[in-house]
Image (spheres, rainbow, N blue to C red):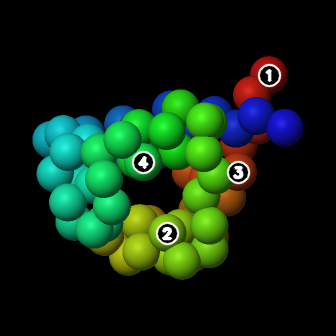
């Protein structure tokens, strides 16, 4: 199953300006962030939790940002 991270990408750009700054805040490499955002690597629960905290995503919107499937 493939996920659409378009809304997440927009939120990251709006809050951090670049994926590199977001990766730094997440304490992961730019390459890993890129791979996760492009569906080449999976988000684990710890990384989702950290991203939710950093981006200020309300709990009821987590699915919208991380579990919207491609159509």
From mark 4 to mark 1, how far is it between C-alphas? 24 Å
- Disc 2 or 4, which lies upstream in sequence? 4
> Is 37 in front, or is 54?
37
From mark 2 to mark 1, how far is it between C-alphas? 25 Å
- The part of the image, by quadrant, that contains residue 56 is bottom left
58 versus 38 height, above or below:
below
- Disc 4 or 1, which lies upstream in sequence? 4
Secondary structure beneath dot 3 equals loop
From mark 1 to mark 3, how far is it between C-alphas? 12 Å
- Disc 2 or 1, which lies upstream in sequence? 2
Q: Which residue is mark 1?
A: 71
Q: Which residue is mark 2?
A: 47
From mark 3 to mark 4, how far is it between C-alphas? 18 Å
> Which disc, if any, is residue 54?
none
Closer mark to the observer between disc 2 and disc 1: 2
> How far from the left and from the top, in percent, is residue 13?
25, 39
> How far from the left and from the top, in percent, is residue 50?
42, 74
Q: From where the camera sits, is residue 7 visible?
A: no
Secondary structure beneath dot 4 equals helix
Secondary structure beneath dot 2 equals helix
> Which disc, if any, is residue 67?
3
Q: Which residue is mark 4?
A: 32
């Amino acid at each position: 199953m493939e996920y659409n991270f378009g809304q997440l990408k927009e939120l990251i750009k709006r809050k951090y300006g670049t994926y590199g700054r977001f990766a730094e805040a997440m304490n992961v490499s730019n390459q890993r962030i890129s791979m996760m955002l492009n569906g080449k690597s999976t988000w684990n629960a710890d990384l989702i939790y950290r991203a939710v905290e950093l981006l200020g995503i309300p709990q009821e919107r987590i699915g919208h940002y991380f579990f919207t499937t491609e159509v």
